[in-house]
Image (cartoon, rainbow, N blue to C red):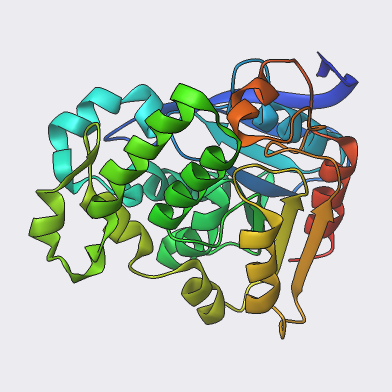
Amino acid sequence: MNVITEKGVINMTEEKIIIGTEYPLEGLITIPETGTAPYPAVVLVHGSGASDMDSKVYKVRPFKDIAHGLAKHGIATIRYNKRSWTHGKALVKNIGPALTVKEETIEDAIHAADLLRADHRINSNRIFIAGLSMGGALAPRIDAEGGDFAGLIIMAGSSRRFEEIIIGQQEDFMKTAKGLTKWIVGKQIAKLAPKLTNIYDLTDEEAKAKKFIGNTTVYYLKDFGQKTVAEYLSASTKPIFVMQPEKDLQATVERDFKKYQEILADRDNATLKLYPGLNHTFMPALYSKITDATKEFKKERHVEDDVIKDIAEWVKSHG
């Protein structure tokens, strides 16, 4: 099947699939028609917040770009609506204060990997995970908790705990904000900071009883940071590809990429690459201040070809 995309005509097939049973999620499996089956495949895992299968933010769709781009290189992908996108109200009702990234993200990524392994067109020994943002930070944990991937691709994923990311972004915002906006952010930091103090000293029940933001409790943060990214990576022997956009305003070179360099310094099977001029979604950056972060995604653009080519070459060289 010839599919016309923004990048031209690509020989591929896209099929509708359902991920999971308790919380079924619509998705797409993209099968290339170049190369020879069984194909290597990549599970695409979202960042934080509710997202559709394309990981759409305003006018950009990074997962759609990556799926179509990898098909051009003979690599299959699977992408799906995030559980909080489709079943947000049900999660609040059924799980409530006990909600963690396990129910929100991890279980569905494992379901996606299992679905690929059952597909005769896919090489079951060459299934990789590519997580963007929080999905990247979670990739080592997803692998350890049942994903069992051939390799891990961390795209703009922070190496910090979630509460550290939140406070760091608020502090960065304070540096560039002015007037009333700066005062409001200062008040938000003052309000949040006490909630994030000594959360690992709390019992699970105490953490579940402590509200964080909206329907999220401190237990969500405790679960996320109980075992750090560094600990998961140190316990893993899988090939790892860390991809960092230089102009990323969420996961930064100074706070995150350099930490990955330290964690993986002695790993022969770790590849780390910095992408000059690109933003959090691996597209050309338009702004340099975190106060303008959302504007980055309001102009239609696409994931850079070199980024997709690097993923394809790395996948083909592993597994």
- The C terminus, quarter of image: bottom right
Q: Nearer the viewer, residue 262 or 192?
A: 192
| Location of residue 188 by image quarter | top left
| In the rendered image, the vertical position of residue 252 relative to residue 48, given as above or below | below
* Residue that extends furthest to the front in the rendered view of this protein: 179
Residue in the image at 54% along x and 38% along y: 173
On screen, residue 77 versus residue 268, left or right, reads left
The answer to whether residue 312 shows anywhere in this view is yes
Q: Position of residue 133 (x, y in %)?
A: 57, 46
| Location of residue 49 by image quarter | top left
Residue in the image at 37% along x and 48% along y: 107
Q: Position of residue 192 (x, y in %)?
A: 29, 45
Q: Position of residue 182 (x, y in %)?
A: 47, 31
Q: Nearer the viewer, residue 279 or 84?
A: 279
| Location of residue 200 by image quarter | bottom left
Q: Position of residue 131 (x, y in %)?
A: 59, 48
On screen, residue 107 versus residue 113, left or right, reads left
- The N terminus, quarter of image: top right
On screen, residue 301 versus residue 182, left or right, reads right
Residue in the image at 55% along x and 62% along y: 159
Residue in the image at 28% along x and 55% along y: 196
Q: Nearer the viewer, residue 219 or 19?
A: 219
The answer to whether residue 46 shows anywhere in this view is no
